[in-house]
Image: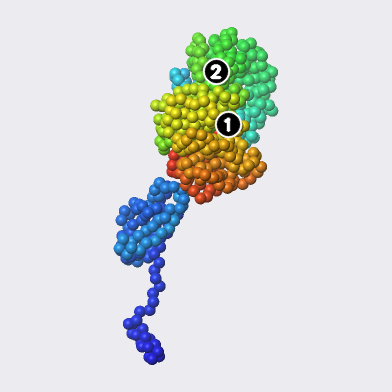
């Protein structure tokens, strides 16, 4: 019987009445790319679907718009379409395609990444003006030793503009040493690192390294937009012709201090040993004029004035140099014609040359650095430093000469520190209650706000601000040194109001979950509470501790951490006792963030191994530490957690993200290596700030 059945089956197959098995078609999709930030365009390719059926695509279970808008499979069940990744939290998200007739479906994961933008300078450091050039009586450019430029347009100064910021110098800027503007739409500035920058009337170029000898520039002079000459510390001269710089040419054995070119085929340079050198296409040998020469100005090829040691002026008539005439100034000279010059010196004195005679020096400023008088005018502007700047620092002033008198000083470069140690604008804290409003504060007392598109100019509101917290876009509270608090309401900052007179007197952190509740902590273990109107007296809750950070997700729950490894919790009315997380004072807790009362994350620094760790809190206990960086590497010091499944930690040059389970690998987002704070309104919007006045947006 079995044999008969087998024979019958074989016969049926031979007659084609019995089909052989066919391999099943697998329904599948591929994503190209399969990783990227929100707004990434993704191509979906599908196979194994029903013939000529409509397919819908879903991202994290929500249907997404596709191109084409209606997807129809081919006669073989394939399709190709594209979609844009919607705003989504970082991590894996399921992408699913479903046939509407066959109900066949296939899925793949798309990894949403958190992307940081480029650093944007919004709070530039400010310093000492070093040089000024006036193309006309209504256009001048001044540069300073913090890589900044300032523009004068007839009556007012604008700026600062960051020109030489964060290029080739661990300070984050290079000192600009000289600027020359033959027209209002062309300037050249040089710095002490051998870099040159050009200005087109609107923006400054990126730096161009032109002095391969490695010497810094002292001076540049451009008689036209197609020719310039620059001289450096090492006795080298370079020329700019029609957009191209020559290499450095050694023309002197000592530092060349100044150069002036009235035409494209005539220049004079002076050096530290009192020599003058002439350019007529090639440079002459040095000619002795004085003991030391600091500055030279030539309005024509037959008239130049150089300033030298002893406050003397020396005149060149096209053939030879005169002997010195005492004028009481030796730092900078500018001659607009053969009958008018102005000279200034480091003791604040200015003298003018009219016809053939120099006036007596008159004290008009503090430490005058440079002067410029545009061609054929008796108008000049001189710049200095030493005036009263913000927070007890020194300001860079400008003085205008109208042909008869010098004006009172106008502050154009408001330095934040002392003339020796200008701390500039080291950002300390940022708070973003929404995606269209953030507030940031810096170490010299400036506050800036962000409106969703751009940052405001820095506004000085106090001194040494340490922390800011904004529960809404209409209220912020900032605290800082001196035990002072400042309030932002209706677009205006008020204060300072001294709220902490206790020992230590330095408020280090503040957190405001609502407009009528804040907690501030200080460097002496005190906490203060704000009820919307008044601050409480300081309460000692951490004897011997110095608080570094506090975070309050609600009015009845806060966590504060200190520099000796302790964490304290606030639950409605009272604070807990300090709890050591590592039982080792070599550990330091540097930042805490609590999006809810049941979840907090703290940054924990291991002083034994110079390693950064993180711990989580579940509302009752603290978890074990997770290493964020390798030992002996710079790592995060601060963090922000807008949700329990997303945190960002920043520090040095790196940022890491947390997805509720694990931390990402470190990612370099700031070459400056000085990230100081971060704030995240949601997992889709973060702002990080650094010690050079820059902000970096993460989405």
95 or 454: nearer the viewer = 95
Residue 202 in the image: state x and y as whole percent. Answer: 45, 30
Q: Quadrant of residue 577?
A: top right
Q: Going by the image, does 331 lie left or right of 106?
A: right
| Above or below 107: residue 409 | above
User: Counting other residues with Cα less than 10 Å from the Cα at mark 2, is it few (<14), some (14-19), or many (20 or more)?
Assistant: some
Asked if residue 539 can be seen in this view, the reply is yes
Dots 2, 1 in contact, CB < 8 A: no
555 or 332: nearer the viewer = 555
Residue 405 in the image: state x and y as whole percent. Answer: 51, 10
Q: Which residue is mark 2?
A: 388
Q: Element type at marker 2?
A: strand
| Above or below 685: residue 482 | above
Q: Quadrant of residue 146?
A: top right
The circle on residue 111 is none
Asked if residue 160 can be seen in this view, the reply is no
How far apart are the alpha carbons under marks 2 and 1? 35 Å
Q: Earlier in the sequence, mark 2 or mark 1?
A: 2
Residue 430 in the image: state x and y as whole percent. Answer: 49, 34
Give the residue drawn at x 40%, y 73%: 23
Give the residue drawn at x 43%, y 53%: 93
Give the residue drawn at x 56%, y 34%: 548
Q: Which residue is mark 1?
A: 525
Q: Quadrant of the C terminus?
A: top left
């Amino acid at each position: 019987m079995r044999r008969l059945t087998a024979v019958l089956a074989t016969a049926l197959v031979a007659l084609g009445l019995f089909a052989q098995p066919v391999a099943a078609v697998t329904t599948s999709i591929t994503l190209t790319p399969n990783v990227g930030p929100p707004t990434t365009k993704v191509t979906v390719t599908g196979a194994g679907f029903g013939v000529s059926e409509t397919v819908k695509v879903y991202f994290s279970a929500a249907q997404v718009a596709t191109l084409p808008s209606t997807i129809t499979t081919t006669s073989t069940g394939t399709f190709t379409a594209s979609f844009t990744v919607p705003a989504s939290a970082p991590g894996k998200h399921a992408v699913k395609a479903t046939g509407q007739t066959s109900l066949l479906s296939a899925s793949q994961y798309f990894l949403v990444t958190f992307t940081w933008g480029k650093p944007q300078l919004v709070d530039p450091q400010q310093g000492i003006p070093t040089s000024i050039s006036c193309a006309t009586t209504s256009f001048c450019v001044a540069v300073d030793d913090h890589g900044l430029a300032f523009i004068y347009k007839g009556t007012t100064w604008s700026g600062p503009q960051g020109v030489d910021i964060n290029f080739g110098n661990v300070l984050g800027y290079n000192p600009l040493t000289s600027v020359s503007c033959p027209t209002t739409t062309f300037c050249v500035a040089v710095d002490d690192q051998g870099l040159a920058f050009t200005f087109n009337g609107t923006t400054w170029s990126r730096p161009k390294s032109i002095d391969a000898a490695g010497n810094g520039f002292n001076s540049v002079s451009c008689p036209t937009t197609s020719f310039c000459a620059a001289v450096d510390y090492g006795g080298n001269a370079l020329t700019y012709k029609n957009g191209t710089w020559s290499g450095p040419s050694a023309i002197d054995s000592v530092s060349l201090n100044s150069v002036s070119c009235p035409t494209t085929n005539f220049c004079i340079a002076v050096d530290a040993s009192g020599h003058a050198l002439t350019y007529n296409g090639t440079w002459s040998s040095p000619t002795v004029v004085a003991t030391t020469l600091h500055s030279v100005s030539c309005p024509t090829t037959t008239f130049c004035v150089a300033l030298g040691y002893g406050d003397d002026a020396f005149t060149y008539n096209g053939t030879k140099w005169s002997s010195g005439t005492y004028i009481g100034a030796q730092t900078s000279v500018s001659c607009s014609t053969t009958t008018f010059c102005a000279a200034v010196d480091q003791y604040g004195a200015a003298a003018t040359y009219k016809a053939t005679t120099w006036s007596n020096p008159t004290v008009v400023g503090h430490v005058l650095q440079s002067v410029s008088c545009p061609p054929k005018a008796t108008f000049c502007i001189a710049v200095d430093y030493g005036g009263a700047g913000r927070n007890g620092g020194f300001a860079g002033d400008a003085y205008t000469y109208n042909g008869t008198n010098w004006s009172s000083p106008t502050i154009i470069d408001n330095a934040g520190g002392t003339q020796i140690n200008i701390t500039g604008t080291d950002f300390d804290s940022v708070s973003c209650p929404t995606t269209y409003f953030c507030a940031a504060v810096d170490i010299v007392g400036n506050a800036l706000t962000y409106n969703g598109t751009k940052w405001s100019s820095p506004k000085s509101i106090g001194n040494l601000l340490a922390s800011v917290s904004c529960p809404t876009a209409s209220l912020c509270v900032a605290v800082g040194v001196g035990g002072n608090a400042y309030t932002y309401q209706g677009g205006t900052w008020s204060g300072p109001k001294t709220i902490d007179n206790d020992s230590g007197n330095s408020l280090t952190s503040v957190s405001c979950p609502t407009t009528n509740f804040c907690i501030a902590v200080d460097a002496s273990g005190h906490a203060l509470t704000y009820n919307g109107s008044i601050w409480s007296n300081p309460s000692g809750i951490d004897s011997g501790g110095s608080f570094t950070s506090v975070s309050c997700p609600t009015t009845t729950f806060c966590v504060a951490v200190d520099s000796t490894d302790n964490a304290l919790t606030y639950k409605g009315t009272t604070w807990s006792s300090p709890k050591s997380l590592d039982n080792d004072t070599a550990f330091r807790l540097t930042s805490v963030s609590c999006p809810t009362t049941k979840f907090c994350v703290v940054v924990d620094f291991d002083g034994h191994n110079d390693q950064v760790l993180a711990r989580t809190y579940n509302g009752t206990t603290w978890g074990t530490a997770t290493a964020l960086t390798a030992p002996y590497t710079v790592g995060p010091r601060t963090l922000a957690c807008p949700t329990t499944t997303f945190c960002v930690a920043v520090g040095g040059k790196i940022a890491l993200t947390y997805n509720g389970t694990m931390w990402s690998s470190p990612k370099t987002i700031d070459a400056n290596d000085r990230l100081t704070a971060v704030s995240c309104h949601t997992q889709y919007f973060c702002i990080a700030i650094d010690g050079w006045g820059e902000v970096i947006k993460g989405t």
